[in-house]
Structure formats: C-alpha cells, structure tokens
Amino acid sequence: MTDLGIESQNGKTDLVRLNDKNLNNTNDIAQITDLDIQKLEIEKKKLEIEEEKILLERDKLLVTSLIEDFKARWQELLNFENENSRWQTLYVTALILVVSWILSNSGESSKYKSIADIFNGENSYLLLCLAFINAIYTLALAYKGYQIQEIAQYLYTRIGGNVSNKINYKFNSWERWRRDEKGKPVLIRSVYYSVISVLPTIVSGIILFLYYKLQFYETHVQRKWLNFVFIVVLIFVSVSFFTALYTTRMNLIWKKIFAEEDKAEEDKRNNKDAGD
C-alpha cells in the first residue's frame, strides 16, 4: 500500500510539472507573438515613411519639371515682347520719317502744294501700299499679342496652379497683382496698348479716306486699277482691325480666370468653416 501511495503521489507531481511546463510554453508563445506584432508595426511604419519619401521625391521632381517649363515659357514670352517692342519702335520711326518727308515737300514753293497733289501719279500706289503694310503690321501685332497672352495664361493657370497646389503657397502671383490690383486696371497701360494698337489702323484709315475723297471717282484706266487696289486694301485693313479687336477678348479671359479663382477660394473657406 505504501508503494502504491508513493507512486500515486509521484504521478501527481509529474502532472503538475507538466502543466507548469505547458503554462510556461504558453507564456513564451504569447511573448513571442507580442514581439512579432511590435516588429510588424515597426515595419509598417518604416514602409509608410518610405512611401512618404517616394511621394515627396515625386512631388519634388514634378515641381522641378514645372519650374523648368515655367522658365522656358517665360523666356519665350519675353522674346515675343521684345520683338513687339522692336516692331513698334521701327514703325513709329518710319511713320515719323514719312510725315517729315510729306511736310518737307509741302507748301507753296514745294512739290506738293495741297493734299490732292500727294495722291497724284505714282504716289497713290505708294500710299495705298503704305496702308496695306499698316494692315499687315496691325495683324502681326495682334497675333504676337495673342501669343503673349496665351503663354501668360498657361503660366498662371496650368504651371502656377499645379505648383501652388504642391507647395501650398501662391506661385506666380505677379499676373494677379499687376492686372487686378484693387480690382481696377492701370490706366496708363490701357492707354498705351490702345494707342499702339489703333495707331496703324488710324493711319491706314486716313490714307484710304483721302484717296476715296480725292481720287476714287477719276475715270481714266489707271484710276480704275488703283480703285481695285483701294478696295483690296480696304478689305484687308478692315479684317486686320477686327482681328485685333477680337484678340482683346483675352483680357476678358483674365477676368474670368480671376473670378473662378476667387470663387474657389471662397468655397474652400466656407467648407473649412462648416467643418469647424
């Protein structure tokens, strides 16, 4: 009986030891599992940081590419403006020379005693050609002006808008500042561009009006050919003038751009206030 009791007691002791061992193994497994979870969380954070770095690098490359595009387009815009300035200077100089030539050859003792004498002979061809050249000049200025406005709007809306969204700061605010300061256009700029644009058409109009008044109803054959040239030049001058007027709508597009920008900013503020 004593041996049986001792064996039974030893069996219970072994069972208790086995249970303690299993419990320790369970605790070790739980500890290992917690460590693995912590490691996974750390790895996850590392991946998130790496993704943020990749996104930042991508945004950096995008902004750099946009800045380079901005520089190229800005240089192109400056080239167009410089070309326009050279043309305007040459035109004003040529106009002064023509007026000086007419004045120096006018008067009682000069070749041309009246305005009608200026249109006599081959001078009519010369003056009509001058009106035609003025029309070409007006058309060229209008086209160059359209290109300048087109590039400026591309820089402001596309490049400036994308860069502003990436850096969270207003980029290329120069156009807004100079065009919409206090909501009023600068008077001197409006007067300057109006005079420069209209001056060639005014000169052409004066030439055509004087020819029509003084020479159009002449009946000999040479005058008939000149009348045909007059009609062609008149049509071309009209087309160039209305084309130049049409390009002024680019200024209205600027107003539309600024209005849409203001509306977007207002909606953004309203949504932020509603969220708060």
Image (cartoon, grey):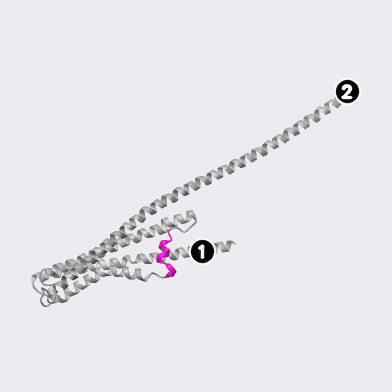
Question: Is residue 139 visible to us here?
Answer: no
Direction from residue 41 to residue 99 in the image, left or right: left
**Within the magenta stretch, is there residue 194?**
no
For the residue carrying disc 2, how many other residues have a C-alpha within 10 Å: few (<14), some (14-19), or many (20+)?
few
Q: Quadrant of the C terminus?
A: bottom right
Q: Quadrant of residue 160?
A: bottom left
**Amino acid under disc 2:** Leu
Quarter of the picture containing the N terminus is: top right
Measured Cα–Cα span from mark 1 to mark 2 = 90 Å
Query: Where residue 55 sits in the image (x, y, percent)?
Result: 50, 47
**Residue 9: numbered disc:** none
Residue 267, label in figure: 1
Left or right of residue 177, residue 23 in this image: right
Are there few (<14), some (14-19), or many (20+) residues within 10 Å of tag 1? few
Q: Nearer the viewer, residue 194 or 239?
A: 194
Toward the top, the furthest residue is 3
Please give the name of the residue rendered at 39% of the width and 54% of the height, measured from the top-left corner.
70
Q: Could you say which quadrant of the image residue 142 lies in?
A: bottom left
Residue at image x 28%, y 63%? Answer: 141
Q: In the figure, 103 relative to 265: above or below?
A: below
Please report the bounds of the magenta region as a residue range: 172-183
Residue ID for mark 2: 4
The reply, left or right, for residue 66 in relation to residue 21 is left
